[in-house]
């Protein structure tokens, strides 16, 4: 027996070690839980080293960039990037509020609801394995991070916290095949499940072929998964084809575009509305008409007075107003008063030019009424009036479309 | 001379070629390999496909020429790798245990100091590693993952080239007797 054990010692030890690990594996698979202690030890042992390396790298890089190459601009750039990220989130929130309600309601809602409580984190390592779609961030349970929390950037969702350790957390990226999140399309509010593909892109599952999803359309989180707050941008559709039994929709995750360095972990999420698409029926801003003719030389106060209404409110002169003013100037210059002339008196000759000195001052200062101002009735024998000086059309300043 | 005598002679020659390493080398080199794998791909994503923990496991197993030592090195490196991955503990552990054992057994029979042998072994063990891991994923975790043969072969060649260079460097850390 002893000889047998000695002879097969190597293979016996091999089988014992494999068996022990199989038991460990079976325990985890059956209970659906992890052997947390071993992972805590490993992560706690590795993250300080990773921090030191990252610190050394960052320090060297920072020294070179701050003091040798750029001095102050580097610090300024970092501050502005942080500010930009914060403003992007705030802008997203404000846009969705303003798109769904009027200004007063949006302000009221803004006062009542606050933005999601978030904490910034830096990526310090990737998970091991050739096809790893998980990273480690330098925030853990001591910073309030818990398993299952959402991880985002101002551009979109990144992933979720897979495990939280005291000094670090493991984040499963949205591109991992085991990742899933509830999403909804912006245009037609089509609901689906976002899943990773193991590489750069993601797909949206469980969308019926009858549902309309277009290339380039944005998907947002639906909030159904209880991880991501509703209204966070997810990504743009790169391709959508009918499939069996569901549509095959590829999506480019916006949060993972470019290199990930810093992320935000949502400690307390706040649901937001899905931003509505801008449509052509929305009111558009029209700039005021440029000053023309004599008005070009008028001071601003005169122009305001000439276009003011009954309450001195500035009113834009229309083409009809200008024709009416021209007729009035011509008739005043020829001493003609509409409505007070005896029958058979000479009609106004609208072809005669109006001399500036013949124009009574009262006529110039008299403001045309914008409301209820009718074009004076012309005599039947009068020749057709000369066309008024052409007016350039008002430029249509389109509202910048953010989509 | 009889065959059994020749056989034992070859074994005894190999036994005398057992390389010894200082404790800090055995501790720091695998740790550095794991740190490399978790940190460097942050900046150079293509380096994520470099299986340095595997290369280090194969090296120590080949040079120590002890199957039990090899399997323990493999198990420890694999479990450390598992604890920093999203996989259940034991996936890399079992894979590298087998690799460590097989590598040490091969080291007893071949001249593993020759660069060409090292290149072939580096390639072979990478492919074997990927295959065992794939089989365990399908068999034990019921994951429907495909075995990408072409990709594995290309990566195996790249890893083997890196392994030859790394083995040359690690040779300098051997204890001189």
Image (tube, rainbow, N blue to C red):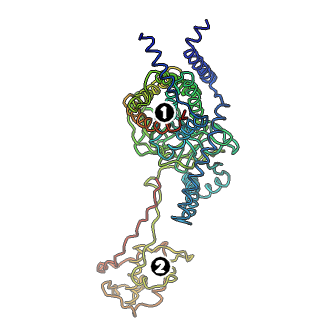
Pick whichever, A43 or A306, lies toward us.
A43
Q: Which residue is mark 2?
A: A368
Residue B9: mark in rendering? none
Locate residue B27, reporting x and y percent.
60, 35
Mark 2 — on which chain does it sit? A
Judge whether residue B89 can be spotted in this image: yes
Locate residue A263, reporting x and y percent.
57, 48
> Local crowd at mark 1 within 10 Å, few (<14), some, or many (≥20)?
many
Q: Which residue is mark 1?
A: B55
Q: Residue at x 43, y 54 (%)?
A: A280
Mark 1 — on which chain does it sit? B
To the question of a shared chain for discs 1 and 2, the answer is: no
Residue A337 to residue A237: above or below: below
Q: How many marks?
A: 2
The CA span between labels 1 and 2 is 91 Å
Element on which disc 2 rests? loop
Judge whether residue A192 can be spotted in this image: no
């Amino acid at each position: 027996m002893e000889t047998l054990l000695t002879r097969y010692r190597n293979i016996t030890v091999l089988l014992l070690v494999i068996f022990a690990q199989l038991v460990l594996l079976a325990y985890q698979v059956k209970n659906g839980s992890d052997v947390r202690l071993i992972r805590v030890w490993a992560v706690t042992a590795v993250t300080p080293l990773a921090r030191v390396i990252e610190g050394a790298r960052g320090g060297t890089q920072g020294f070179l960039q701050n003091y040798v190459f750029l001095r102050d601009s580097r610090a300024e750039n970092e501050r502005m990037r942080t500010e930009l990220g914060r403003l992007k989130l705030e802008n997203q929130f404000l846009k969705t509020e303003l798109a769904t309600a009027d200004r007063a309601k949006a302000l009221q809602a803004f006062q009542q609801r606050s933005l999601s409580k978030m904490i910034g984190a830096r990526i310090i390592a990737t998970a091991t394995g050739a096809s790893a779609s998980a990273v480690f961030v330098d925030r853990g349970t001591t910073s309030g991070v818990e398993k299952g929390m959402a991880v985002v950037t101002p551009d979109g969702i990144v992933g979720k916290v897979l495990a939280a350790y005291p000094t670090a957390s493991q984040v499963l990226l949205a591109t991992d095949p085991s990742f899933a999140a509830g999403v909804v399309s912006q245009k037609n509010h089509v609901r689906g499940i976002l899943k990773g593909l193991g590489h750069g892109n993601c797909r949206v599952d469980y969308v019926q072929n009858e549902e309309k999803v277009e290339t380039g359309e944005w998907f947002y989180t639906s909030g159904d998964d209880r991880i991501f707050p509703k209204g966070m941008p997810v990504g743009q559709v790169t391709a959508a084809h009918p499939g069996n039994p569901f549509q095959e929709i590829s999506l480019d995750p916006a949060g993972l575009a470019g290199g990930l360095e810093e992320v935000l972990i949502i400690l307390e999420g706040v649901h937001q509305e899905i931003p509505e698409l801008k449509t052509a029926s929305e009111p558009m801003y029209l700039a005021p008409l440029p000053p023309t003719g004599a008005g070009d030389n008028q001071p601003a106060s005169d122009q305001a007075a000439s276009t003011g209404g009954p309450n001195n409110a500035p009113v834009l002169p229309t083409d009809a107003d200008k024709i009416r003013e021209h007729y009035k100037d011509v008739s005043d210059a020829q001493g003609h008063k509409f409505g007070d002339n005896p029958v058979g008196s000479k009609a106004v000759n609208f072809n005669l030019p109006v001399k500036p000195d013949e124009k009574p001052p009262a006529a110039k200062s008299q403001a045309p009424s914008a409301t209820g101002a009718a074009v004076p009735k012309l005599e039947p024998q009068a020749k057709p009036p000369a066309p008024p000086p052409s007016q350039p059309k008002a430029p249509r300043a389109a509202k910048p479309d953010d989509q | 001379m009889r065959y059994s005598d020749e056989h034992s002679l070859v074994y005894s020659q190999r036994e005398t070629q057992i390389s010894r390493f200082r404790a800090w080398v055995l501790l720091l080199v695998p740790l550095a390999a794991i740190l490399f794998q978790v940190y460097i791909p942050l900046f150079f994503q293509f380096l994520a496909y470099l299986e340095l923990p595997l290369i280090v496991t194969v090296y120590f197993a080949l040079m120590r020429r002890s199957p039990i030592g090899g399997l323990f090195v493999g198990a420890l490196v694999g479990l450390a790798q598992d604890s920093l991955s999203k996989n259940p503990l034991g996936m890399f552990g079992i894979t590298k245990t087998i690799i460590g054992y097989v590598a040490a057994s091969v080291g007893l029979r071949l001249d593993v100091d020759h660069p060409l042998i090292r290149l072939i072994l580096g390639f072979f063990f990478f492919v074997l590693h990927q295959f065992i891991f794939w089989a365990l994923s399908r068999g034990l975790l019921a994951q429907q993952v495909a075995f990408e043969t072409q990709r594995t072969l290309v990566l195996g060649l790249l890893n083997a080239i890196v392994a030859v260079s790394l083995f040359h460097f690690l040779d300098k850390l051997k204890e001189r007797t």
